[in-house]
Image: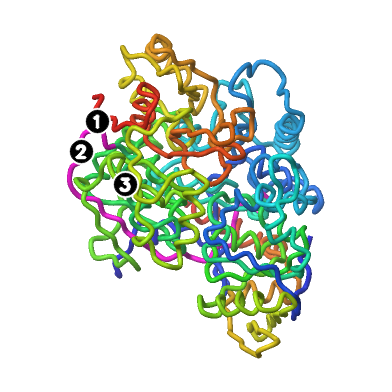
Amino acid sequence: MKPKTLFDKIWNSHVVDSIPDGPDVLYIDRHYIHEVTSPQAFTGLRKRSIPLFRPKRTLATADHNIPTEHQERPIREELSRIQVETLSKNCKDFGVELYGLGHPYNGIVHVIGAELGFTQPGMTIVCGDSHTSTHGAFGSIAFGIGTSEVEMVFASQCVLQPKPKKMRINIEGKLRRGVTAKDIILYIISQISASGATGYFVEYAGRAIRSLSMEARMTICNMSIEMGARGGLIAPDETTFAYMEGREFAPQEKEWDIALEKWKTLKTDPDAVFDKELNFKAEDIRPMITYGTNPGMGMAIKGTIPHLEDIPKSEQLSFQKALKYMDFEPGMKLEGYPIDYVFLGSCTNGRIEDIRAFASLVKGKKKAESVTTWIVPGSRQVEKQAYAEGLVKILEEAGFAFRQPGCSACLAMNEDKIPAGKYAVSTSNRNFEGRQGPGARTLLASPLTAAAAAITGKITNPADLM
Amino acid sequence: MAIDKFEILTSTCVPLPAENVDTDQIIPARFLKATSREGFGENLFRDWRYDKQNTPVKDFVLNNSKYSGKILVTGKNFGSGSSREHAAWAIFDYGFRVVVSSFFADIFKNNAMNNGLLPVQVSETFLKNIFEEIEKDAATELQVNLEKQEIKLLATGDKETFDINPYKKLCFLNGYDDIDFLLSKKEKIIAFEQQRKD
């Protein structure tokens, strides 16, 4: 038999039908929904007078719009409140399980799906959210879809998708001190650009990837979309199985054994061919920070912003526009540059390990007075665990307040907006113009780098404080 | 629910040469709170179109009465970032029916096609050519012929063919909708579910 990639194996086993010269009808195992991209899809079902075909495969949460303080009170902002209430009504009407505001399982959709074990190896997973790629960390095909496609999945548990091309990114070697999963992915994107993987589905491989925890793998897969990839996945292994065992929706007892046998076969065959293959060395990666307005504009914290002549002619205008927005100059060093805000959280870096990393660096130190910080857990379960492990106490002693879970300042749909012109070191995934609030200037970085900046008030290499 | 039929469109264009235009620029997140599909055109490119005092930004192309039409011509990697379909709705709601670029982000491309907004991918050279012609004359017209998969600068006669998935082409030409198609596959889907259980 022809050797196959892991992606091919999962994709092919989910094809219900193929349209000649057209997309495949792809069966979807898990469908996550939230309040922002689902209401129009529910309206579509009502207009057609059809039920939601497989509600048991669907899980809902409220995350994008919710406040991160006083969640026990009604949402103040009217439109946000209506959207969250609309989700509750829709879930009730169509029989979908909802972990809404106040539920012990509430949280950011990509954080809860994994921690509940609803996401499992070998599955196809979609959500009306581009960071659905996060779930690829379990060895599944997970990708973001639009609202029309959400309606397709509601109606038929399938989407129409052309099969993407395949890319493998290998990272061999050992990571340096202070270098985290976030630095790996920011480094890759800085090397291949924000559109470098458009049209591809990426498999991450190599020893540096294998050495990572599940949560770190999620951070990497999460940002696959930031280089344009349809998604990214990592073959499941003992790390994956250990993480899965005993989770709320994970298979139990005899079913666990059956599942495990199947999951162990989920890997790319040795001679399988990818459309494109890239290789990086872990030793070349340093703690990273972005300086521009797309995630591809990243560099080592100790590096310098490129000079205009280093940028291809066709991209110089965009480069200049980005630096103007950020109020930076070509050739500038950013280390030591003062910042105003620090945001720890999001589906990229809002899990317990991220909070542990941040707390480990600030322990026994004091937050810089000039910096405002928002520390936002990714879910109620992460919040609970942070209290139980004493992390919140460490944070509070160092001068940091701990908020309630939600997407928060990552996209600033709730009140958590970075003011215009202010610099925010952010562990989220996008530094687009206005993403964290109109006029806000975002510097993407790891939780360790965010912690270092919160202590010194400046862009700082975390390795210097460790 | 079906989309509008699309055959041939001849129109003047609105040029937006910026590259890497992400969907946060097309429609900022704070405008995603609606629960219907309509009305997003009002906030299309909101933060480029209006300043902090909500005054129209003079040099932004949508505020320049010189340019109008049903075709938006943009720089490469258009529609990157967030999967929000609101971006496609906003562009359609504003009145555009075609977006021309040398490169589209995947999710945006799907979203556009699911809403009757045709993404036409052209070569870098042809894109440059279009921008130059519009620069010379704001009344420059483009003709998009879907049946022939051809885009033409009417003034010069310069043309190029573009790719579209044959299934999607059929949908556009006939105004078909993916959901009707999927519903027609219900029996096959149920059979697939049963066979997987064995």
Q: Is residue A195 above or below residue A329?
A: below
**Three-letter code for the amino acid on which mark 1 is drawn:** Ala
- Secondary structure, mark 3, is loop
- What is the x, y in percent for residue A254? 38, 35
The residue under label 3 is A304
Viewer-side residue, A352 vs A337: A337
- Name the chain letter of the residue that bears numbered label 3: A
Chain containing mark 1 = A
10 Å neighbourhood of mark 3: few (<14), some, or many (≥20)? some
- Tell me residue A78's x, y (percent): 77, 29
Quadrant into which the N terminus of chain B falls: bottom right
* Residue A390 visible, this orientation: no
Kindly identify the residue that appears in the image at 45 percent across and 43 percent down: A134
Label 2 or label 1, whichever comes before in sequence order: 2
> Which of the 4 image quarters holds residue A354?
top left
Q: Residue at x 69, y 82 (%)?
A: B145
Q: CA distance from mark 3 to mark 2?
A: 20 Å
For mark 2, name the chain: A
**Vertical relation: B170 (above or below) A293:** below
Q: Position of residue A87 (x, y in %)?
A: 71, 35
**Dot in front, 2 or 1:** 1
First to last magenta residue range: A154-179
Q: Are marks 2 and 1 in contact (CB under 8 Å)?
A: yes
Q: Is residue B54 left or right of residue A249?
A: right
Residue hosting label 1: A463
Say which label, 3 or 1, has the lower sequence index.
3
| Above/below status of B14 relative to B57 | below
